[in-house]
Image (cartoon, rainbow, N blue to C red):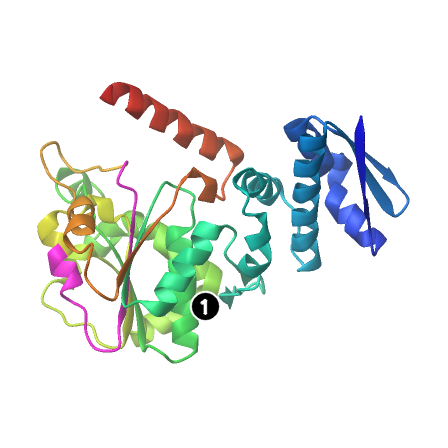
Amino acid sequence: MFEQSISFDRMEQAVSLFGSFDENIKLIEKQYGVDILNRGSELKIAGEPEKVAAAMRAVNGLLTLINKGEALTEQNVRYVLSLVEDGNEDKLAAMTADCICITSKGKPVKPKTLGQKKYIEAIKSHTIVFGVGPAGTGKTYLAVAMAVNAFRAKEVNRIILTRPAVEAGEKLGFLPGDLQSKVDPYLRPLYDALFDMLGAENFARYQERGNIEVAPLAYMRGRTLDDSFIILDEAQNTTPEQMKMFLTRLGFNSKIVVTGDITQVDLPDGKRSGLVDVLRILKHVDDIETVMFNEKDVVRHRLVQDIIKAYEKAAERAKK
């Protein structure tokens, strides 16, 4: 039986590391098949040498998060374990350094995965960014956070958020109210993210002044959008013509972020996705960056990762 020890500088580190009912330590023990004991200011890990070494790296990675002031959750503990598996746990310190903005409730918004950090860096350094990946990877939320940050810093005068209303025919027609009332359900995720960042009162005030606009994609036609941070969400449900129309709205001193999941296209059969097309067409154009997320970047419930993996395996079997 091989054994290694880690010493704590403060008891608060041990309390954070163990978590409620020792849930974090139990997760590490189960993952690596090791035994972990806490003796005063020292943590002892026992088991096979390779597994003890991996568990040590995981614990050190978690201590890095704790020392940066991060609260440990099941999501970030599991993510650290996946980084250890890939040999990337040394990148944790750089990842936690970024605070994009503060929400209306005083909570800092930070990238939680390496994929999210890459996405944030791409938005900072490019005029057009495509964020493509499965649900729960923070594509829309982080784009809205970056938009609010740019607006607060007076880098742009307006935030414009848009989505294609895929069911723009019959089903919308049956909903009560005017056109805005009919399309609002499609735009709800964008409203939710803005409420979180700005608070409902500030959002309403900025919207009234015209500083914030949340509208269906059809409203973008014929416009030139200067001094704006523009986000197109659910872009997999655009047609190639709509995507071209949207991207050519770009004006001076503006940024565009396009988000979508090419595995969840809701267009009628036979219609091509504008997002799938544009990733190929604009692949080598300067100042345009594409960031691809995967299931490891999912920051929702653990089961979301498992669901995505199961669907990917089913798709691979179907291809064969």
Q: Which residue occupies the foreground of this view, 91 or 247?
A: 91
Please tell me whether residue 211 is drawn above or below residue 5 in the rendered image.
below
Please give the name of the residue rendered at 44% of the width and 53% of the height, measured from the top-left corner.
116
Q: Which residue occupies the foreground of this view, 200 or 292?
A: 292
* Residue 276 in view of the camera: yes
Q: The N terminus is located in which quarter?
A: top right
Q: The C terminus is located in which quarter?
A: top left
Locate residue 70, reporting x and y percent.
65, 55
Please give the name of the residue rendered at 17% of the width and 49% of the height, measured from the top-left corner.
280
SS under mark 1: helix
Please tell me whether residue 287 is drawn above or below residue 74 in the rendered image.
below
Specify start and end residues of the magenta stretch as a single range: 244-263
Please give the name of the residue rendered at 41% of the width and 63% of the height, measured from the top-left corner.
121
65 sits left or right of 100 in the view: right
Q: Is residue 206 magenta?
A: no
55 sits left or right of 93 in the view: right
Q: Which residue occupies the foreground of this view, 258 or 170?
A: 258
Locate residue 288, reporting x and y percent.
25, 62
* Residue 199 in view of the camera: no
The residue singled out by tag 1 in the image is 201
232 sits left or right of 55 in the view: left
Q: Quadrant of residue 255?
A: bottom left
* Amino acid residing under circle 1: Glu
Locate residue 307, reporting x and y percent.
42, 29
Please tell me whether residue 136 is drawn above or below residue 291 in the rendered image.
above
Please give the name of the residue rendered at 35% of the width and 28% of the height, measured from the top-left corner.
312
Count of numbered circles in the view? 1
Q: Is residue 249 magenta?
A: yes
